[in-house]
């Protein structure tokens, strides 16, 4: 429940700041449509994040004994979270640039 609410709050905060400081708003698009697109792109980013974590931690790290010998589970979690964060950050910026910014 807390993850759901933190995602919603951070997404709204990110929307407000991104549309004010990062992207040039398309005046032909309604704010409602803009927010819905932003929300959908954010949910897709969340799904990408979860898939990367699942593959990295639950499939790769859990099944590769040599990797378990090389790094602790805490380090593996942190490593894959950082990797997922980087991938999703790039995805979010590019997708929002394509779908939301003034052409």
Image (spheres, helix red, strand yellow):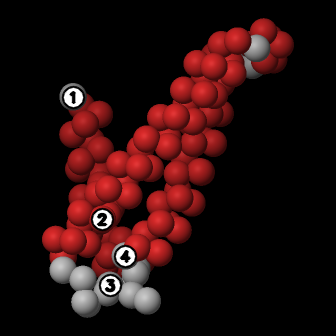
Q: Quadrant of residue 90?
A: bottom right
Residue 23: percent from the left, percent from the top?
40, 80
Q: Mark yes or no: residue 75 visible.
A: no
Residue 6: percent from the left, percent from the top?
27, 41
Nearest to the observer: residue 7 or residue 54: 54
Nearest to the observer: residue 47 or residue 5: 47
Which residue is at 83% across, 13% downward?
A: 66
Tag 2's secondary structure? helix
Identify the residue position indicated by label 2 in the image. 37
Identify the residue position indicated by label 3 in the image. 25
Identify the residue position indicated by label 4 in the image. 100
Which residue is at 26% across, 90% downward?
A: 27
Residue 99: percent from the left, percent from the top?
40, 73
Q: CA distance from mark 3 to mark 2?
A: 13 Å
Decide: is 10 above or below 27: above
Sequence order check, earlier mark of 4 and 2: 2
Q: Nearer the viewer, mark 1 or mark 2?
A: 2
Decide: is 62 above or below 29: above
- The answer to whether residue 100 is left or right of residue 4 is right
Decide: is 77 above or below 88: above
Q: Nearer the viewer, mark 4 or mark 3?
A: 4
Q: CA distance from mark 4 to mark 2?
A: 8 Å
Sequence order check, earlier mark of 3 and 2: 3
Sequence order check, earlier mark of 4 and 3: 3
Label 1–label 4 contact, CB within 8 A: no
Sequence order check, earlier mark of 1 and 4: 1
Tag 4's secondary structure? loop
Tag 3's secondary structure? loop
Identify the residue position indicated by label 1 in the image. 1
Sequence order check, earlier mark of 1 and 2: 1
Q: Quadrant of residue 39?
A: bottom left
Q: CA distance from mark 1 to mark 4?
A: 29 Å
């Amino acid at each position: 429940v807390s993850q759901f609410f933190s995602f919603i709050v951070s997404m709204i905060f990110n929307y407000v700041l991104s549309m004010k400081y990062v992207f040039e708003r398309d005046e032909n698009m309604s704010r409602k449509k803009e927010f819905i697109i932003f929300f959908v792109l954010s949910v897709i980013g969340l799904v990408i994040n979860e898939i990367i974590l699942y593959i990295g931690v639950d499939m790769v790290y859990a099944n590769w004994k040599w990797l378990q010998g090389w790094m602790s589970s805490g380090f593996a979690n942190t490593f894959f979270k950082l990797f997922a964060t980087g991938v999703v950050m790039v995805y979010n910026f590019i997708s929002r640039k394509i779908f939301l910014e003034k052409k």
